[in-house]
């Protein structure tokens, strides 16, 4: 066995035997308990098998690593609901319509506990992948929920306490796209492309490295859809790009190499109307953006690059995060070249492209272009007949949480994560509309805000509106490098809070009671305890 493979197995707590269970053992039959009787009464629209297991992935042409990976298949329902180009693409893409009910038979083929969290979705608390519902190795469970959210790009990832960052870094992530409840005409809809942004580091021998400090971890290379800064062949036409920041720690400041504005069609939990032009767009870990990019008029060299433009994080360089790609540097994230994609190129371009064909063709075994069912949700922040719109005016905070580093660990208002505990100020009345505020740093720590860095604050259960930001004048110079890139106009479930800044969001806690999470989506901070429960109570 190669030494690095042995090292990985040791890290993963696995014996070599664990690798033997591969695709063959993949199915809902083994290790998955029966559907609870209450849920079995009405059938799901879509029934899937999902497994977290190990899989060899060529992270580089010369380098195969054993990674963690989700695999999915349709048991009943639209066969086009699962699309997976296979490694190195990070994971399967699930696609369903708003209002549909999903039943997912999950099996944990890892050698450690895991859960599946459905990031951004409103759902019952026992389906949400809370770490208290960890699934043991070899065991399984059923996730059963309706898609109540607006059409947008969501994702799923593990959420076991203390191991989330490690499992995500080593490959566990998938996309969940919600389409409008009714199908709409395919014409006049841009074809689209999913882009999952991550970063990774390798040692001198080329082996994958993950050695975070409590501050976090930055890789040396940006991966897009599992490929380091790939060149993507795209048709010379406007394309819709669905971006997910699936990195554990790194935020992106995204702009185009030819200086054109970034046209934003949608955010974490919905579409924007009208579309917005920004000089650049910030994308924090966990966040999604839908962009429109016209690849018709390309620059003279025929290449358009999506770039990280570089920003000051306000941490003043005190973070000893060794990386060849500092946040302040400018570097390409993906290169686009106008050319009809070829079958071979799709291996590098897990494109979600709408062809002339029917929806059924999407999941065809063909290695060539996969036609995409029309995704034609008209941009709108307000949903008709669904979630009522939320007022977006600023107001006094109903709850305020300070983001602090205390005794070497990140806390929320001085508290670390406890599996079941809910403090008095973490209880929310069902149906309440509230303003929550995060205050990054106490302001009284001296040393010019030492130990402050950006955090990406995330709430389970709700999509919220960002209603207020009070930047800290001490960090004005750093703030100026990011402020024009916040897309606060749309529905969000994760928001970047810069050093010294106070950010207020407004959310309505409706639909479900129970225990949910709020935490920093810099996953090393989350695992380090920068996470708390909140309980919605009737
Ligand atoms: Cu994507 Cu609790 O997180
Ligand atoms: Cu989440
Ligand atoms: Cu954080």
Image (cartoon, rainbow, N blue to C red):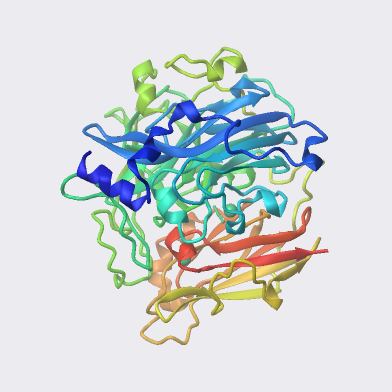
Which quadrant does the N terminus fall into? top left
Which residue lies at the image location 58% right of the left edge and 38% below the top edge? 31
Which residue lies at the image location 67% right of the left edge and 48% below the top edge? 127
Judging depth in this view, the residue of 433 and 501 nearest the camera is 433
Judging depth in this view, the residue of 9 and 177 nearest the camera is 9
Which quadrant does the C terminus fall into? bottom right
Q: Is residue 110 above or below residue 250?
A: above
Which residue lies at the image location 77% right of the left edge and 47% below the top edge? 387
Q: Is residue 341 left or right of residue 205?
A: right
Which residue lies at the image location 23% right of the left edge and 45% below the top edge? 4
Q: Is residue 282 left or right of residue 398?
A: left
Labels in figure, total: 0
Residue 508 visible in rendering: no
Q: Is residue 406 above or below residue 160?
A: below
Q: Is residue 82 above or below residue 228?
A: above
User: Residue 446, percent across and down?
Assistant: 40, 87
Q: Is residue 7 left or right of residue 349?
A: left
User: Residue 341, percent across and down?
Assistant: 39, 19
Q: Is residue 179 left or right of residue 311?
A: right
Residue 230 visible in rendering: yes
Judging depth in this view, the residue of 130 and 310 nearest the camera is 130
Judging depth in this view, the residue of 111 and 176 nearest the camera is 111
């Amino acid at each position: 066995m190669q030494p690095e493979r042995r090292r990985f197995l040791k890290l993963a707590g696995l014996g070599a035997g664990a690798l033997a269970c591969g695709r063959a053992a993949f199915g809902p039959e083994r290790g998955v308990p029966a559907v609870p009787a209450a849920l079995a009464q009405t059938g799901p629209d879509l029934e899937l098998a999902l497994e977290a297991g190990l899989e060899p992935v060529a992270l580089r042409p010369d380098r195969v690593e054993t990674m963690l990976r989700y695999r999915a298949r349709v048991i009943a329902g639209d066969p086009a609901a699962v699309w997976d180009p296979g490694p190195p693409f990070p994971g399967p893409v699930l696609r369903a319509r708003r209002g549909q009910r999903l039943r997912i038979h999950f099996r944990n083929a890892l050698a450690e506990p895991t859960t599946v969290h459905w990031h951004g979705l409103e759902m019952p608390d026992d389906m949400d992948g809370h770490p208290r519902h960890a699934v043991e190795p070899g065991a399984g469970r059923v996730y059963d929920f309706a898609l109540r959210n607006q059409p947008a790009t969501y994702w799923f990832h593990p959420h076991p306490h203390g191991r989330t960052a490690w499992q995500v870094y080593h490959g566990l992530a998938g996309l969940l796209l919600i389409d409008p409840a009714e199908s709409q005409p395919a014409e006049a809809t841009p074809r689209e492309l999913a882009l999952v942004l991550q970063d990774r580091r390798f040692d001198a021998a080329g082996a994958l490295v993950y050695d975070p400090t409590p501050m976090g971890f930055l890789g040396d290379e940006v991966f897009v859809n599992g490929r380091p800064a790939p060149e993507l062949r795209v048709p010379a036409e406007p394309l819709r790009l669905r971006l997910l920041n699936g990195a554990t720690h790194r935020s992106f400041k995204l702009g185009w190499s030819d200086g054109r504005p970034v046209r934003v069609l949608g955010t974490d939990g919905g579409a924007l109307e009208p579309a917005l032009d920004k000089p650049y767009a910030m994308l924090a870990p966990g966040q999604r953006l839908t962009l429109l990019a016209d690849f018709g008029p390309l620059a003279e060299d025929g290449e358009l690059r999506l770039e990280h433009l570089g920003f000051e994080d306000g941490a003043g360089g005190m973070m000893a995060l060794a990386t060849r790609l500092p946040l302040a540097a400018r570097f390409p994230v993906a290169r686009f070249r106008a050319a009809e994609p070829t079958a071979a190129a799709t291996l590098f371009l897990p494109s979600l492209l709408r062809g002339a064909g029917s929806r059924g063709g999407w999941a065809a075994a063909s290695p060539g272009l996969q036609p995409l069912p029309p995704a034609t949700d008209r941009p709108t922040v307000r949903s008709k007949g669904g979630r009522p719109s939320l007022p977006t005016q600023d107001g006094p905070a109903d709850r305020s949480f300070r983001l602090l580093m205390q005794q070497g660990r990140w806390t929320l208002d001085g508290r670390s994560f406890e599996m079941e505990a809910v403090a008095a100020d973490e209880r929310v009345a069902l149906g309440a509309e509230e303003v929550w505020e995060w205050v990054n740093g106490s302001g009284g720590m001296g040393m010019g805000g030492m130990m402050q860095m950006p955090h990406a604050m995330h709430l389970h259960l709700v999509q919220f509106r960002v209603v207020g930001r009070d930047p800290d004048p001490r960090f004005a110079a750093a703030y100026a490098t990011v402020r024009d890139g916040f897309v606060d106009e749309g529905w969000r479930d994760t928001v970047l809070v810069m050093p010294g800044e106070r950010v207020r969001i407004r959310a309505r806690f409706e639909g479900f009671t129970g225990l949910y999470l709020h935490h920093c989506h810099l996953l090393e901070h989350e695992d380090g305890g920068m996470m708390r429960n909140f309980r919605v109570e009737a």
